[in-house]
Amino acid sequence: MTHQPALPTLAAADPEIAGLVEDEARRQHDKIRLIASENYVSRAVLEATGTVLTNKYSEGYAGKRYYEGQQNIDPVETLAIERAKALFGTDHANVQPYSGSPANLAAYLAFAKPGETVLGMALPDGGHLTHGWSVSATGKWFNAVRYGVRKETGRVDLDQVRDLAREHRPKLIFCGGTAIPRTIDFPAFAEIAREVDAVLVADIAHIAGLVAGGAHPSPVGHAQVITTTTHKTLRGPRGAMILSDAEHAKAVDKAVFPGLQGGPHNHTTAAIAVALGEAAKPEFGEYAHQIVANAKALAEALTERGYDLVSGGTDNHLLLVDLTNKEIGGKPAAQALDRAGIELNYNTVPFDPRKPFDPSGIRLGTGAITTRGLRPEHQPKVAEWIDRAITAAATDEQSTVDTVAAEIREFLGAYPIPGYTA
Ligand SMILES: *Cc1c(COP(=O)(O)O)cnc(C)c1O
């Protein structure tokens, strides 16, 4: 039993669950984890999430709660808020959203009415479900208009954003997404939003750690409202925050509670505060820049091996690879890679001719491997493993996949993770 912190009581009380947690800790240790939305949190963050704060109800906000006994919870939440405001340089922060999707729902509730028009990035082009995609509540309850990327460049088509904004006059414009390998031009979005009098929401879920660490431009001063998860590059617990200017603060708070949620998850709030404290340290700035350096090195190494990167490369933590020229779909490639010890997800690429459940691409991110200490000089090796596994999958050759998995396990022994000791 080697999960960290150790779980002796859980192992005695519920060996079935404890065993699965242990297996998951080992799995996270033994794989090159390239899922762009994942990371490894610190031991301190893990400890904070496993505390008695989970026992407490705290509907409301510090000083205005609907339950007694907030002597310790109020200062925890206030610390998280103050650290978020200081780290990102915003007037206001709400740290209560349960996750990224409810944080975005709160933005709709605050600034649009059902049936009103919103403008967001299309899911297949890199947007998030909650930016108005048809199967999402946000696409069903609002009149969602969608922009995309240019076919020639793979980059956001700002002319289309401007044209659609002028034509449809949305209440809300979302920028940011889940599969955008390039820098988001917040000033350009802000200019468009200003022209049509829309609230600009920057959803920085993927890049929050890069923004905090100075490795991506900040939306502050451009977007009135900023939503983010806390568990991706920011390297906190699963959770979310909404940051805003002073003018929009009250509407944001009212939308989160009582508009959308009941009691905040106080154990998560504490862990968010811890993660924000970590992100304020100079080492975190180095971490953020190292994430980008690793992604650029991996992009270069994959390009050398003939892989076709959407937009031709990356500015951030994320790579989107179109596998069409490798004659394998994203799904079989991702499955073979998982067997080979490389974990990522299949993904649509812009203008994908294949179906969303069996698309042409794979998405990779370097947040987690950078936490582990992998550096740019390791990326040619990572690219070689990826290439060998994909080539083996295309030719149905299982022994290569097994060899790669063994090589990776051996290699990763030198790169410990916070939640496990081998
Ligand atoms: C991850 C993500 C979300 C949603 O976060 P969940 O915590 O999974 O609900 C929202 N927006 C973007 C851009 C994301 O990448």
Image: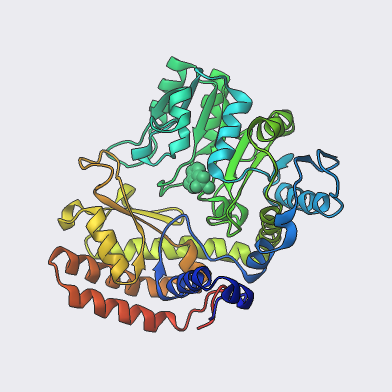
How is this picture coloured?
rainbow
Q: Which residue is drawn at 75% across and 40% down?
A: 59
Side of 257 relative to 22 (left or right): right
**Residue 84 percent across, percent down from the top left:** 70, 49
Q: Is residue 185 visible?
A: yes
Whole-percent x, y for residue 357 in the image: 27, 45
Q: Position of residue 338 (x, y in %)?
A: 32, 66
239 vs 250, left or right, is left
Figure check: 343 above or below 259: below
Query: Compared with residue 379, is residue 292 higher up or lower down, i.e. above or below?
Result: above
Residue occupying the point 33% across, 47% down:
311
Q: How many labels does the image show?
A: 0
Instruction: Tell which of 8 and 221 is nearer to you.
Output: 8
Residue drawn at x 48%, y 79% is 415
The part of the image, by quadrant, that contains residue 200 is top right
Camera-side residue of 334 and 204: 334
